[in-house]
Image (cartoon, rainbow, N blue to C red):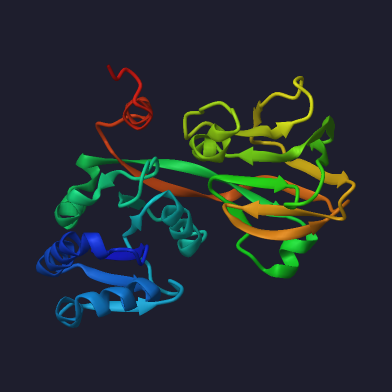
């Protein structure tokens, strides 16, 4: 079994658990592939373990074909892990060392038993196929950023600018001209992220929809909207400012007024591993403290 590992470099409080995981992986004959930045951090913190571990160190996965990918960190780390593996539909399991951790299947206390658990993955885990948004616009192509969002795409005003105007289309059908501080288009996975903060709806993660939500709309009639994921969305930004900010899962760049932005369902999905016995509603109750006395 080959396991690829991508993680936050803030592992100082978790070195005991990481050490136990690497030891267990070695004992079970697992091949490991580390992202280079995480490897450098761990090699500094625990050189004895890293020198005794069978591993490869990479910036990009390239020809490596892991059976599983471990994301070690919070939800932000999970998003970077999804970008790291790219279009490979290989199961990713999140181990939460952050705060809310909606995307994580396990806590850091479970890390040591993960190599054994993965040998029984069919019994212990289920795999959710999560859709992504593909983003196309001239500025994004020029900057060569990873053009896919597992959570959301946000078009917002610059810090000192007035509101933006976002002329929005669903396929060939005109939807609305949003006047707001910004407009957010989320996947179901992203419904528990930025979308939640701006008052958008929570959506089960495997439903094929996009969520359109204005950010601080300048009209109370502009409400969040859930639309099917089968048609592309087109947004043409306008307003007084010459530039706006486009963020794709937090990777941001500047786009020009009038530049057409096209959002469509990506041609691949991210496979998210979850503990079989836990459901989406279980996660909401735990993370949002629903039903707490």
Q: Is residue 262 above or below residue 172?
A: below
Indicate the quadrant containing the C terminus: top left, top right, bottom left or bottom right.
top left
> How far across and down, in percent of the image, does residue 156 sit?
72, 46
Identified at 56% across, 40% down, the residue is: 194
> How far across and down, in percent of the image, does residue 247 sit?
65, 53
Residue at the far left in the pictured view: 27
Q: Is residue 134 left or right of residue 151?
A: right
Identified at 75% across, 24% down, the residue is: 222
Identified at 79% across, 61% down, the residue is: 138
User: What count of labels does the image hold?
Assistant: 0
Q: In this view, does 65 lie above or below 287?
A: below
Residue at the far front in the pictured view: 160
Q: Is residue 133 left or right of residue 11?
A: right
Identified at 37% across, 63% down, the residue is: 8
Q: In this view, does 281 lie to the left or right of 160?
A: left
Is residue 94 or residue 120 the one in the foreground?
94
Indicate the quadrant containing the N terminus: top left, top right, bottom left or bottom right.
bottom left
> How far across and down, in percent of the image, does residue 216 sit?
70, 33
Quadrant for residue 12, please give it: bottom left
Is residue 194 or residue 293 the one in the foreground?
293
Q: In this view, does 124 lie to the left or right of 144?
A: left
> How far across and down, in percent of the image, does residue 79 sit?
47, 54
Q: In this view, does 81 lie above or below 129?
A: below
Is residue 198 or residue 113 the one in the foreground?
198
């Amino acid at each position: 079994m080959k396991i690829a590992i991508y993680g936050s470099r803030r592992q100082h409080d978790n070195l005991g658990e990481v050490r136990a995981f690497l030891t267990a992986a070695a004992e079970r004959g697992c091949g490991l592939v580390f992202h280079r930045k995480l490897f450098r951090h761990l090699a500094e913190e625990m050189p004895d373990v890293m020198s005794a571990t069978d591993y490869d160190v990479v910036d990009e996965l390239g020809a490596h074909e892991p059976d599983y990918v471990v994301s070690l960190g919070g939800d932000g780390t999970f998003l970077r892990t999804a970008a790291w593996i790219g279009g490979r539909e290989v199961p990713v399991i999140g181990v939460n060392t952050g705060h809310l951790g909606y995307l994580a299947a396990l806590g850091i206390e479970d890390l040591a038993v993960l190599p054994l658990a993965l040998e029984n993955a069919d019994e212990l885990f289920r795999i959710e196929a999560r859709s992504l948004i593909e983003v196309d616009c001239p500025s994004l192509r020029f900057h060569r950023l990873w053009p896919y969002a597992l959570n959301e795409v946000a078009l917002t005003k610059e810090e000192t600018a007035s509101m933006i105007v976002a002329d929005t289309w669903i396929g060939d059908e005109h939807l609305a001209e949003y006047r707001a501080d910004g407009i957010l288009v989320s996947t179901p996975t992203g419904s528990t992220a930025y979308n939640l903060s701006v008052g958008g709806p929570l959506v089960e993660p495997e439903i094929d929809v996009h969520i359109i939500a204005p950010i601080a709309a300048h009209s109370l009639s502009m409400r969040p909207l859930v639309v099917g994921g089968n048609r592309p969305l087109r947004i043409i930004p306008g307003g007084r400012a010459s530039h706006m900010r486009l963020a794709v899962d937090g990777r941001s760049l500047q786009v020009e007024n009038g530049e057409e932005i096209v959002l469509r369902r990506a041609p691949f999905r991210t496979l998210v591993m979850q503990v079989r016995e836990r459901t989406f509603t279980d996660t909401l109750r735990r993370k949002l403290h629903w039903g707490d006395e």
